[in-house]
Image (spheres, rainbow, N blue to C red):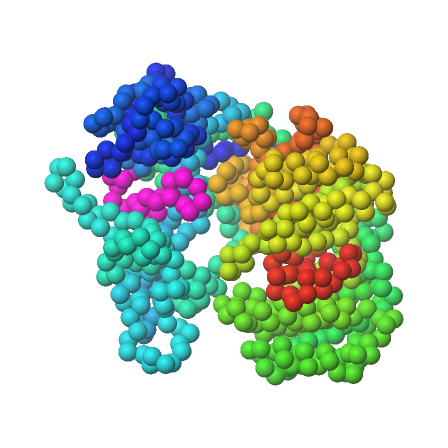
Amino acid sequence: MDKKLILNHLDFKYPEKHIKMYFSAKDDEKHCSDKLDTLQQTPKEVIDIFGQQGGFNLGKQPVFVGYNFRFDGFEPVDIDLSKPENATFMRRYYRHELKRVLSKHDELIITKPRITDDLQVWKQAEGEVRTVKYKGKDVRIWVMDRFSLKVRHDSFNQCPYIMVTYDRPALLFNAPLSMLLDDDGSDPLGQSNDRVTADMLRLVMTRREYTDEHGKTHVRRNIDSLEHLQRHNIGYDPTTTRAVVTKKLKQILALDHEANKKTDESRYVKYKQKITDFQKRYLLDNELRKVFIDLADNFREVNPLQVGQVEESKRMLVFGHNTKELRQQRGINNGPARISPHVAVKLIAIYPISLERKVAELIGGFKNGSYPKYVKNNSNKEVGNLVQKTMSHYIGTQVDYADSALHIKFWNEANPLPEIKARLQDEHYRNLDKNSQYIGIYVTPIPKYSSEKSQKMVYYKVKEAFLNLGIPTQCIEAKKMTRGMDGDIQKGKLNFIYTMQNMSVAMCAKLEGMPWLLDETKKNDLVIGIGAFRSDDNMQYIGAAFSFDNTGAFNSYRYFAKSQLRELMGAIEEAVLEYASINNKPEQLVIHYFKQVSRRNEFQPIEDMLHSLNLDIPVYIITINKTEAEDVVAFDPNSTYRNYKQEEKPSLMPYSGTYINLGKTREGRARYLLYNNTRYDDNNFSPTDGFPFPVKLTVNCNTRAGEPDSQTIKTLIGQVYQFSRIYWKSVKQQGQPVTVSYPAMIAEIMPHFDNPTVYTNANCLWFL
């Protein structure tokens, strides 16, 4: 397997000599210096020289620096940028220089992201302009490419570098705020869902002109928070200020559907092309190269010593009849690894009355595998011989229809909840057959990502209402079902069978079965996943999946609000005790965590808890970014695939299971980049599987575990990789391990429930 990979890093060298800079306890008259607020931001040399001098109260008052110019009252200090203790200042200095040089390009908008202090550069994408209708007029929408420039030190290769990342593009309304927010004399008492109001806006682009020292006029554009401008009394001209399109604006302008368009094009190719074009155009600047010594002309080839590969055996999955298979979609044809324990399962249909016939075919397809016959009877085209396996096949037990009186059809498609709740209170639901396990198939007319909060709540409330009766539900959007069925009839295809297959897999897990498991000999390893979801009102909830064994078998879950750290630790203790009572005491504890852990707030309480249980075992906490890594990305120049036309195209996506050692953090934590995808060395990759970006991992361990050796690291990374393969909501391979994604699902749903303990069956993954 070829290990030649390209990383989106541009190496350079530190100056051989120290750089003279200028420092003061007071700002310069024109406020042109840079303010250093903390000791961490302040160079070691400044701390050593001025720490004891009058006028410098380091750590409590800021220090001001002139990087290239000595302001009145500023003292010169020679700075060694290569010192590890100067790492924060080093990044700050080079960021300042990047901004200074790039600012001469009027077409660039230089800002910084909300979370980090790195530079973000906005640039209008060439040839990407859209036109939308607003208030009866054609308005242009600019597509804005966004790039982040991050200066870091590579602790593995011992050199500094610029990381060039392509962030997701933004859309900019090419019309002034004055036009966007003009009410056009509309009825002041009337409500309109298609009118933009100020509360829908977040970021805006402001425009100001200035004259340089040579008398030349320049345009300076900034990306600012509208709220920040208002709260800090910063003036802006509404006739020249443009709004960045928010999620709400996308809905009003009918742009929200574009984000979900499917394509067989590789994401890696577009990303690589964008950052390469940016680098060639702006980062080969001679003035920049005077600052960034020996700045590389091309992105770095990854050191082979940094590259590892998850063992091939870690890919294998176990299905029904102990069949072992690499790919989920093939393996599930052998049935589930663990069948549903229920003797009889009955299907309840919940649907809008307008779709009654289609729902009947859907339910019939699940029970009898009759969907191909339905398409053949309604299509004038030749339909293939694909056989639909029944739901009984996928869950391993008998499936039948529920009594007709239990099916629920509703008229109000905007809010079916009242009709559904009323039916759930009638005598038929009060006298359910106790010998049967019911599952509802809810055909929702409301899209999952509906813009209306009240409509989004219907999905959660319907799910909760059925769970209160012990009935899990499987949801499908009405539009998706209709589009799939009608498309098959028009084209003479049977593509919707794969949607039904995914639904059957999820229902197996909801009915306490396990569609597939990892091909691992069971060990006394306890794996706990803790994930998070941030709601629309910006309140964070934490969902914890307790717990898994090393074969991927799910045991139980708990749900907590962010502030309930003590309860979270208590639940980890409970999971350890429960596991030990069944499996003997665990030999090690592995926690997959959604964020960087604090030694004092999170790691230490876990160690204290284990000590109280007399468990002196290794603890490994693997921080797993909730989203795919789009900042650190590696490319395989030899990676290709065939599109739906059977044309060979560049992919640039590394092999599945590839991981890259990114070196250690300042705290000594090992960092890795892991690729979870379906590009194996059997050359059977399909672009419909997608081109997921890698996930970033950080390994933390307790003193009992000690410094993990290479084999331990490989095992821990392999385990993260394996847990991305037991996602039971679909037969598609996922980039995120379920140890993080399952808890996030729980955390997204539970805050909307009236009862946080609505369903306590530990073996039912009702939230899929």
Q: Quadrant of residue 678?
A: top right
Q: Quadrant of the C terminus?
A: bottom right
- Residue at (55, 78) in percent of width and height: 414
Image position of 267 (left or right of 193): right
Q: Quadrant of the N terminus?
A: top right
Above or below, comparing residue 146 to residue 72 in the picture: below
Furthest residue to the front? Answer: 54
Residue 133, given in percent of the width and then of the height, sits at: 35, 70
x, y (%) of residue 155?
51, 25
Residue sticking out furthest to the top: 17
Q: Is residue 508 magenta?
A: no
Q: Nearer the viewer, residue 565 or 655?
A: 565
Q: Quadrant of residue 33?
A: top left
Which residue is at 82% across, 79% downward?
431
Considering only vertical position in the picture, is 398 above or below 337?
A: below
Residues in magenta, as a range? 102-123
Image location (x, y in percent) of residue 472: 73, 66
Question: For residue 120: magenta?
Answer: yes
Q: Could you tell me which residue is drawn at 22 percent across and 50 percent down?
A: 208
Q: Nearer the viewer, residue 198 or 231?
A: 231
State how many labels appear.
0
Is any part of residue 760 visible from this angle? yes
Residue 439 visible somewhere in the drawing = no
Q: Quadrant of residue 138?
A: bottom left
Rendered view: 122 above or below 96: below
**379 or 287, which is in the foreground?**
287
At 40% from the left and 76% from the top, the residue drawn is 192
Compared to residue 462, the image places residue 201 above or below, namely above
Q: Position of residue 72 (x, y in %)?
A: 20, 27
